[in-house]
Image: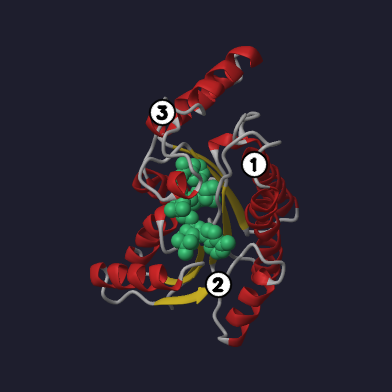
Amino acid sequence: MSKTVLITGGSSGIGYSVSRYFAKNGYDLIWISLLKEEIEEAKKLLQNEISNCIINTMVQDLSKPEAAQKVYDWIAVNKWKVDVVVNNAGYGNYGFINEIDLDKELNMISLNLVNVYKMTRLFLQDMVKRNAGTIINISSNSSFQPTPKLGTYGATKAFVNHFSRSLNEELKMQGSKVKVICVCPAAIKDTNFKKTNGMEKVKTFDGLATTTAEEVAKDIWKGFTKGKSFIVSGWKMRMLYRISGLIPYKVEQFLVRRETKEI
Ligand SMILES: NC(=O)c1ccc[n+]([C@@H]2O[C@H](COP(=O)([O-])OP(=O)(O)OC[C@H]3O[C@@H](n4cnc5c(N)ncnc54)[C@H](OP(=O)(O)O)[C@@H]3O)[C@@H](O)[C@H]2O)c1
């Protein structure tokens, strides 16, 4: 019997690239994204590449309080069994915290943090009952340290790291086979992220450890199939992450500021 992966934001960027890996390996896909036209276009594109690939889609604003429950109920009504959930939909908000739009900040916290929490809780209960399944939460390298000009974004992703990794340890303590994987990609040069977030001129997308959606998707698939629980994606970012504990805070902040400034 084929397996099913639910991917939020599956119709573009990392979500689309990782969908290709799951589809090529026989998974049916469920995508939840914001823009109907983009979902339809992406669905056609992927089905042209992988003709027998099943993709069910739902247009939903996941920053809304009732969104996760609506997704869960829609899946229950259709009697689909979700084997893997990839909580990928998210965005950043670039600028000084005291100057950027409050509503955009609150919306981002709802999407990047509250929705990831709710989706994980909802789908986890069935996985725990079946003693099988994986939740993959997409965090960011901005979660590793305070990131001026991406301060709130980085904080939402720091939540994703601690929540996902603690939950994975708790599941191990309970003897469960369910896994939670936390993925931290470096800055990606070829997704909509930098445009959506007004970051087209920001150095980090052409900086120290830039990666691509394909490299991130490949790392996710490799980590998933090898049973990893923490994936730092992009080989340059992995090298930096390994030595980051040795770098004094002032030097680290100097480097972060250089990366997040506009050129
Ligand atoms: N790009 C980077 O440099 C980078 C680095 C580290 C981590 N990340 C993380 O990676 C994840 C994916 O980012 P990406 O680079 O692939 O960006 P992307 O191309 O902009 O993709 C974001 C996806 O999220 C969906 N989305 C956005 N707001 C939504 C909402 N309110 N409700 C439902 N879906 C929504 C979008 O759907 P529509 O297209 O329909 O709007 C899109 O499919 C994010 O969590 C991001 O924080 C990105």
In the rendered view, tell whether residue 48 sits above or below residue 15.
Answer: below
Is residue 189 left or right of 80 when viewed as pictured?
A: left
Residue tagged 1: 100
Is residue 87 left or right of 166 when viewed as pictured?
A: left
Amino acid at dot 2 = Val
Q: Which label lies toward us, 2 or 1?
A: 1
Q: Residues under labels 3 and 2: Cα distance? A: 33 Å
Is residue 76 left or right of 39 when viewed as pictured?
A: right
Q: Which residue does the image show at 67% across and 37% down from the upper left?
A: 99
Residue tagged 2: 82
Q: Which residue does the image show at 45% across and 32% down from the upper left?
A: 202
Residue 13 in the image: state x and y as whole percent: 41, 53
Residue tagged 3: 236
Residue 248 visible in the picture:
no
Residue 161 in the image: state x and y as whole percent: 65, 43
Which badge, 2 or 1, is on the more N-terminal residue?
Answer: 2
Amino acid at dot 3 = Lys
Residue 166 in the image: state x and y as whole percent: 72, 46
Determine the secondary structure under disc 3.
helix
Of the 4 image quadrants, the one containing the N terminus is: bottom left
Is residue 69 left or right of 193 when viewed as pictured?
A: right
